[in-house]
Amino acid sequence: MATVDIWIQLENHAWDVCPSLPMDRMTSAGTLPVSPLRLVIMHSPVTGMSRTSRVNRPITTDALILRRYTTDWRSPDDRKVNPWDLNEPDPTDAGTMGTIPGPTIECNVGDTFRIHFRNLDMRTTPAAPWDRSAALISELKRTHSLHAHGVSFPTKYDGAYPLSPPDRDQPIEPSERPFWDSIGVKGPYKQGDRVPPLGSFAYVWEARGPASAGVWIYHDHSICDGNVARGALGLIVVHNPADKLNEVDITPARLPDGSWTGSPLVPKSIPIKKGTLGILDQPAVDHGPTPGHPGGTLRIGNVVIEVDKAMGWVTGVSLGTYREPPDQAQFLLVFHELEGMGMCINGRQYLGNTPTLVAGAQTRMRFGVAGMGDAFHTFHIHGHRWVVPGPSGKTPTAIEQSPQTEPTSSFEDTKVFGPGTSFAFTLEEGTGLFRADPPFGEWHMHCHVPMHMMHGMAGSLLVVKGGELAMPLSEARAVPRNRSRRSLRARRRPSMSR
């Protein structure tokens, strides 16, 4: 049994729900803005790094990003939610500066984790963090907390406004006294259900027994509960090493390039002596100068085009090759809504931006799926089936201490779930009825509510051998809109005159 310390800071900045493609690979719908590309200012408050970034579809207000840090919030410790996601952007200061969902909290059954939380919500009116003259919104609207599902704790660590009592083990330091006074906390102790801007609080949660195993949600539950719709949520993964049937062990060797910020692709550049920018008439995203390519690079889907802007030439094309897939992988997916943007998976919308999870023919895949927001969803993967495991036994003690490996469902390929719901299951490629035969290729993975799917809640599972050239994946052709029946009848109806 161990105690795991994790440092998390809440920050506010712009978020792009379509970071990879300004279009939908599934429908080729012309509803996504592609031009002109918008400019936003990205600012990392601890490192001080600021930059102007071009985005395809930013949310209308600042997102609230839960971000992982090293001890005492000294420096960002950003990690991808799914390193084997083909579309997940760089989460570091050079990229999105954090993730939605926020840091994955991982431990084993029996462990205790201490979450050191600091609130650095500095939203202004208007919501423009780069405008230093703008006024901050009220402290109460910038008050936040963390509330966990599926694990054990006393009420002082519940993080649920206004019910959590003061924590007598956490006196308010003199340096934080003005911040707590600003939200009306006049007593000597901190309260975990209302952490003020620039304030901090430590939550202690325990994964008590096999009943805690699985995937759970944690999220903001303070004064403004709508903050979840701005991105303030994350996932807890409690592993049960005794569960040999379902668990995966994610070591550095099983990460792409051994890194939590790695990519499923190995860059492979194809030089071109002389080209023309005519190839770039398609929607493209300018990623700016890169080392060795002072002209810059432009990305169209998985293709990175190296450009000499001064000469107007394409100097090279980088497609990349797929790394050898791991034998075990963990895939985490949150189906949710972001304020003003609608349906998302992991903070992103539309096939080509949402997760495209890369696996191999023999990969054991441990899925954790959660729902948040106002809508109910269905989780569906084409070509694959699974069984949801659960407890066995007949008495409460036997059930709670059982290894949680007893099947609780028949074979499923679609599962209904709702806000605050989470579940986990394991898929093993190469094991008969559970997967397609052969499994290779790209498989839809989406919400089966048609309106949700068509509004961007669709990703994919991509099964590869490893070593293949990463050619652009399939894209749909735009479907012409039919005239309404009423307009057609009106055209056919002869005119009537008296």
Image (cartoon, grey):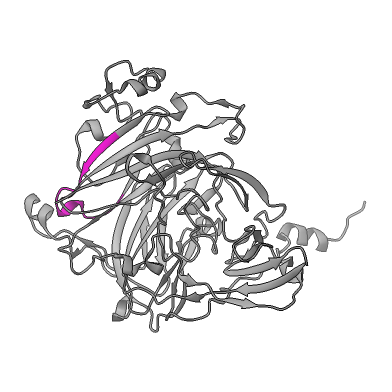
Q: Quadrant of residue 264?
A: bottom left
Q: Nearer the viewer, residue 247 or 405?
A: 247
In the rendering, at what x and y percent does residue 328 appear?
31, 70
In the rendering, at what x and y percent does residue 202 appear?
28, 35
Res. 28 visible in picture? no
Q: Up-down: is 421 above or below 283? A: above
In the rendering, at what x and y percent does residue 456 appear?
54, 57
**Left or right of residue 52, residue 441 in this image:** left
The reply to whether the magenta stretch includes residue 213 is yes
The reply to whether the magenta stretch includes residue 479 is no
Tell which residue pokes out farthest to the front in this image.
Answer: 292
Q: Nearer the viewer, residue 39 or 348?
A: 39
In the rendering, at what x and y percent does residue 126 appear?
61, 30
Q: Up-down: is 38 above or below 274? A: above
The span shown in magenta is 202-216
Res. 484 visible in picture? yes
Image point (40%, 84%), residue name: 438
Q: Quadrant of residue 174?
A: top left
